[in-house]
Image (tube, rainbow, N blue to C red):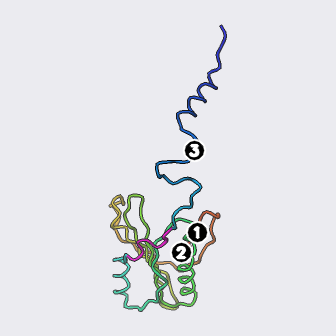
Amino acid sequence: MQSVNLRPWLLAALLSSCGSNEPATDGAPVADEPLPPVDCNRGAEQPSPAGDNFARQSGVDYASCGQQRRAFLPACCATATAGYDCLVAARDSCSPARLAESFGTIEGDTIFTDYFVVPVDGGCEVVVVTDDGQDSYRDTSFPAVSMRHCGLARTRAAASADTCPILQLDAC
């Protein structure tokens, strides 16, 4: 019995069912067209209720390091880095400051993280207030608002060209 090699026929059938390399005619973007500009701070105007509450209760006048929407895109690295650098400089000089950051979950809910440089006896610390109360899929066995006290902050370089620098907190 002679075997028949069906691979060329299967490949031809698969390729013909996937369409052609001709440009789309239905108005869909073509791969060579530029993508629309990225709005790195879309939604950043929404304040953090827990961060605002902490700032009010502490009674400290915080300089602003900005309010940003964390977008995990290389085009948005400059915005994030400026906020982080401001916070690190405030920590190094022990000057009260606040950086408000938010990001959206894949479902569209907002999670807020506020970083405060707070004077304490003999120096400063970074207080991180995280509010994930609007996240529909958060672990409800933990409080919606959490707070961490950290001794050090620095901007850590990006791991690759496709990622932004991050704020690294130590001694939390």
Query: Mark number for residue 22?
Result: 3
Location of mark 1 (residue): 164
**Residue 132 in view here:** yes
Whole-percent x, y for residue 156 in the image: 61, 72
N-term-proximal mark, 1 vs 3: 3
Q: Residue placed at 55% from the left, 74% from the top?
A: 167
Q: Which residues are magenta?
A: 38-45
Along the viewing direction, whichever of 104 and 37 lies nearer the viewer: 37
Q: How many marks?
A: 3
Q: Secondary structure at mark 2?
A: helix
Q: Is residue 16 highlighted in magenta?
A: no
N-term-proximal mark, 2 vs 1: 2
Q: Residue placed at 56% from the left, 33% from the top?
A: 16
**Residue 127 in view here:** no
The quarter holding residue 155 reads bottom right
Q: Secondary structure at mark 3?
A: loop
Query: Mark number for residue 80?
Result: 2
- Whether label 2 touches label 1, CB < 8 Å: yes
Image position of 95 with respect to 99: above or below? below
Whole-percent x, y for residue 94 in the image: 53, 90
Image position of 41 with respect to 32: above or below? below
Residue type at mark 3 is Glu
Q: What's the CA distance linking mark 3 and mark 2?
A: 40 Å
Q: Quadrant of the N terminus?
A: top right
Residue type at mark 1 is Cys
